[in-house]
Amino acid sequence: GFGIVGQGLYDIIKGQNLNLELTRIAIKDPSKKRSLDASLFTTNHDEILDDPEINTIVELIDDAEAAFDITKKALSTGKNVVTANKKMIAQNLAELVALQEKHGTSLLYEGAVCGSIPIIRNLEEYYDNELLHGISGIFNGSSNYILSKIYNEGLDYAVALKEAQDLGFAETDPILDVGGYDAKFKLAIATAHAYGLFLDPESILNVGIQNISTADINYAREKGLKIKLVPTAKKISSGQIITYVLPKFVKSDDFLYNVENEYNGVTVQAAFADKQFFFGKGAGGHPTGAAVLSDIAALRYGYKYEYKKFRQVNGLINTDRVNIEVYLRYTHEYTVEKLNIHNISERFIRNDHKYVIGIVSIKDLIANRALLLNKDVFIAHTGRINYSNQELEISAEALALN
């Protein structure tokens, strides 16, 4: 692939004195104008995959299914692979790990999660023997750019989205970004390295920002809060974690409050290292290209992910039986009833919109995903979590992540 990330990687490579040779680039559209000599390109990816002189494949295409086929063939024929395709990895990680073990090859994908932030390598190396209480943050630069422009500059959602697309931050299909799907795939990958669980991405709740309105922004501003799209993986007991992607009201003392535009931020809460925060650009060709190049360089000394926590028998499961407090803007009362929102602490009714603050279970949100897609519905996590069906209580651990 030679799209935004592929070109970004090439820009970095040509400016560095590196011990690597770029032999061929497989592309889909031969009629598209390119900045390099035409002899470097091919529309037949098998020319690369079948070349015995090539030992590393860099996979940077949008199509997750095609990327999986390419990656499988490469790993199976003794070639290492570097990829930034988070959907492909998240949906097929168990099989990809098995292929690496069977054929003695390596698959690296730092660029797939949070762009320039080396979060996967840190989870693999620095936190490999740590007890992690939670990992959360801003994993999608496109949605964060849009939210920043809406909140800070008063842009309409559609205008902010168009800006993000024009700058190359947004995916080809913007719903992948604004709907929280991109963040969900990244969360699934991070969870594999943080907790050793290979989750089906479909089991993770994702609610996006595409229905956000001026009323939601005004509510946040009045409370001194900002709205961010925040994926979370959190250990709630010795044997359970909870994973979800939701818009969240962020307080001014939260690290994420000042993460703006295309930047990403990751908070890791550990038992011994305590809270640590990683910050960097999460979108764009050069930041992601730099992460891809880091993986290519790591292959020179035989680096592989060890998946240590996956190999440990820890008995962890991912649960949806957790209650959280949410802000729900809606039009029809049946929305509140259908979601089974209870313990309502605040209710607002006006001609143009209504909202409530109350408790809802992750399980009920998953069961009503279609309802949450309605244009007149917007939901955001207040940051408070309830581990049982009893009255809402916030543990010190929960506060540490908020």
Image (cartoon, helix red, strand yellow):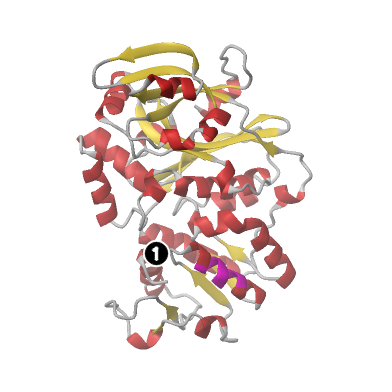
Residue labelled with disc 1: 5
Residue 59 visible here: yes
The one of 271 and 227 positioned closer to us in this rendering:
227
Q: What kind of element bears circle 1?
A: helix
In the figure, is residue 361 to the left or right of 239?
Answer: left
Q: Point out the residue furthest to the bottom here.
A: 39
Taken as a whole, is the magenta stretch helix, strand or loop?
Answer: helix
Residue 291 among magenta residues = no
Question: Compared with residue 314, is residue 95 higher up or lower down, i.e. above or below?
Answer: below
The one of 202 and 143 positioned closer to us in this rendering:
202
Q: Point out the residue furthest to the right here.
A: 313
Q: Over which residues does the magenta segment extend?
A: 66-72
Q: Position of residue 5 (x, y in %)?
A: 39, 64
Question: Compared with residue 121, is residue 384 higher up or lower down, i.e. above or below?
Answer: above
Question: Compared with residue 167, is residue 188 higher up or lower down, i.e. above or below?
Answer: above
Question: Across the whole image, how many numbered discs are drawn on residues?
Answer: 1
Rendered residue at 64%/64% (across/down):
303
Label 1: few (<14), some (14–19) or many (≥20) C-alpha neighbours in 10 Å: many
In the figure, is residue 95 to the left or right of 113?
Answer: right
Q: Position of residue 247 (x, y in %)?
A: 42, 33
Quarter of the picture holding the N terminus:
bottom left
Rendered residue at 56%/86% (across/down):
51
The one of 315 and 289 positioned closer to us in this rendering:
315
Q: Position of residue 295 (x, y in %)?
A: 54, 64
Q: Quadrant of residue 37?
A: bottom left
Residue 126 visible here: no
Looking at numbered disc 1 in the image, what kind of residue is underneath it? Answer: Val
Rendered residue at 42%/81% (across/down):
43
